[in-house]
């Protein structure tokens, strides 16, 4: 059978088109994989030498990056978005064998704190929380997500509870001749406005919500720390405990500095302590 040159040309052209389409498909898949799946093989925490990711939880915990005015430029914040991204990268970085959360924060947004906590709990490797000066409120919740919690004897720990406060300007507005006008389609749509007094019914709503959040906080700490809810509820008066009392109460596992944390990772990973290197 004689095969014409034109037939061979058509087959060759079809092969070229198929290869081009396959290559384009690979590019599209790679873009999706990197940008939408959360994976990026070029994103690493380790320099190839260090093996313990160090993720800071400092200042106010927020959900996303926020713009601040000129008077607040020096305020430290930890964003849920960035922290979770770093935790995800640790799962793909082949050199990372453990994660240390360095905590120096008085808390912040409850939902953001919970999301970070849950991401720590999902880690496939040993995790430690190292509380420096403050690991309280939402920041303490974050600490409970780790496998082991360390603190200094001088650390402030705990403050399990929820707070809400705001300034109410109705009297000042009245003194300045200003009248607050509110139009709302529902009875409680404008409750919590600083320009009008809080009614008893509105206060009850806010206190209801705070109690629900408080109870959930207690429940999550109890679950994460393997404690009885009653035991945590007794501690959940909003106060902080110094490191030594936090240890007695079961809120932390051990007193110690970074070298104590290093020894713990060495035991967990079966490595000599000198081979446990924190990523700076």
Image (tube, rainbow, N blue to C red):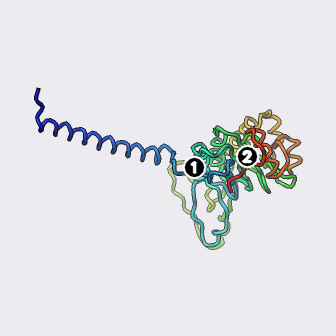
Front-most of 121 and 249?
121
| Residue at the far top in the pictured view | 1
| Residue at the far front in the pictured view | 2
**Mark 2: which secondary structure?**
helix
Q: Which class describes the residues within 10 Å of circle 2: few (<14), some (14-19), or many (20+)?
A: many
**Mark 1: which secondary structure?**
helix
Which dot, 1 or 2, sits closer to the camera? Answer: 1
Chain-order first, disc 1 or disc 2: 1
Q: Is residue 217 above or below residue 105?
A: above
* x, y percent for residue 2: 10, 29
CA–CA distance between discs 1 and 2? 18 Å
Q: Which class describes the residues within 10 Å of circle 1: few (<14), some (14-19), or many (20+)?
A: some
* x, y percent for residue 239: 82, 50
Residue displayed at 74% across by 47% down: 275
Residue beneath disc 1: 85
Residue displayed at 84% across by 40% down: 250
Residue displayed at 73% across by 46% down: 143
Q: Is residue 24 left or right of residue 247?
A: left
Q: In this view, does 262 lie above or below 196?
A: above
Front-most of 141 and 212?
141
Quadrant in the rendering for residue 62: bottom right
Q: How many marks?
A: 2
Residue beneath disc 2: 143
């Amino acid at each position: 059978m004689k095969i014409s040159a034109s037939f061979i040309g058509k087959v060759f052209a079809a092969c070229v088109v198929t290869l081009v389409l396959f290559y384009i498909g690979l590019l599209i898949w790679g873009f999706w994989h990197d940008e939408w799946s959360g994976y990026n093989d070029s994103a690493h925490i380790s320099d190839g030498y260090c093996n313990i990711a160090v993720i800071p939880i400092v200042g106010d915990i927020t959900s996303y990056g926020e713009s601040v005015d000129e008077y607040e430029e020096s305020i430290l914040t930890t964003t849920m978005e960035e922290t979770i991204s770093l935790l995800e990268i640790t799962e793909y970085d082949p050199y990372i064998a453990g994660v240390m959360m360095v905590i120096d924060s008085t808390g912040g947004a409850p939902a953001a704190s919970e999301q970070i906590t849950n991401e720590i709990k999902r880690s496939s490797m040993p995790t430690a929380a190292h509380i420096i000066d403050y690991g309280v409120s939402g920041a303490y919740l974050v600490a409970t997500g780790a496998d082991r919690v360390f603190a200094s004897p001088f650390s402030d720990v705990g403050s399990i509870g929820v707070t809400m406060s705001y300034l109410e300007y109705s009297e000042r507005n009245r003194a300045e001749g200003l009248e607050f006008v509110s139009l709302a389609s529902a009875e409680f749509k404008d409750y919590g406005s600083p320009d009008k007094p809080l009614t008893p019914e509105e206060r009850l709503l806010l206190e209801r919500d705070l109690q629900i959040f408080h109870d959930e906080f207690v429940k999550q700490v109890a679950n994460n720390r393997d404690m009885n809810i009653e035991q945590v509820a007794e501690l959940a008066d909003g106060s902080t405990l110094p490191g030594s009392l936090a240890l007695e109460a079961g809120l932390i596992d051990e007193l110690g500095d970074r070298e104590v944390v290093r020894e713990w990772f060495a035991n967990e990973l079966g490595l000599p302590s000198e081979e446990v290197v924190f990523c700076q």
